[in-house]
């Protein structure tokens, strides 16, 4: 039987600030984040992504297994890389934080840019 996943997003001053992920009713992980909405496409422009071709590229090794479980998005095939229909997690050197970005069917960044400030698996101390 597949696990039931629930994602609870918290906000501060109207912006997302954290996510708690539950698996089968138990806390799995907590993530603290900031969202950069500058450059995000507004409602006027429709974002075209092909859901059946959506894939995940995680360039932050310590997050690969975690984000693959949370988002249930197939990992990119390294033999066939593509910037189209992509959720990319990379390390942003300027902010010294992992960064999540979304790319549409034309490989154009759609926004928002989400910076992961911290993450903790349930049961981790600290």
Image (spheres, rainbow, N blue to C red):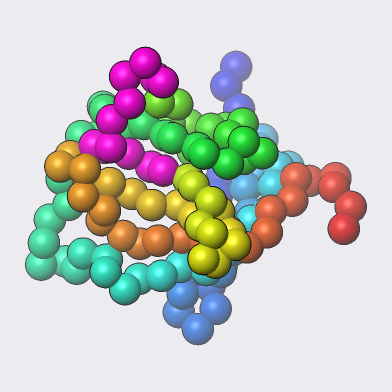
In magenta, the rendered stretch is: 77-88
| Image height of 115 relative to 49, above or below | below
In the visual, does 79 lie left or right of 83? right
Count of picture labels: 0
Residue at 31 percent across and 73 percent down: it is 38
Q: Main secondary structure of the magenta part?
A: loop
In the rendered image, residue 108, in percent from the top left (x then y), is placed at 21, 50
Quarter of the picture holding the C terminus: bottom right
Residue for point 42% across, 34% down: 56
The reply to whether residue 26 is visible in this rendering is yes
Relative to 60, is 26 on the left or the right?
right
Q: Indicate whether residue 36 is drawn in magenta.
A: no
Which residue sits at x=19%, y=68%? 42
| Quadrant (top left, top right, bottom left, bottom right) of the N terminus | top right
The percent position of residue 32, horizontal first and vertical second, equals 63, 62
**How far across and how far down the image is residue 117, in percent?**
63, 63
């Amino acid at each position: 039987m597949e696990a039931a996943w629930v994602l609870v997003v918290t906000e501060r001053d109207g912006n997302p600030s954290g996510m708690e992920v539950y698996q089968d009713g138990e806390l799995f992980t907590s993530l603290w984040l900031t969202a950069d909405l500058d450059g995000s496409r507004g409602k006027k422009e429709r974002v075209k992504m092909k859901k059946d071709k959506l894939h995940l590229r995680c360039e932050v090794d310590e997050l690969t297994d975690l984000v693959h479980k949370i988002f249930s998005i197939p990992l990119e095939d390294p033999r066939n890389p593509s910037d189209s229909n992509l959720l990319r997690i990379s390390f942003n050197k300027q902010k010294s934080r992992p960064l999540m970005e979304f790319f549409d069917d034309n490989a154009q960044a759609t926004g928002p840019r989400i910076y992961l400030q911290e993450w903790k698996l349930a049961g981790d101390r600290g």
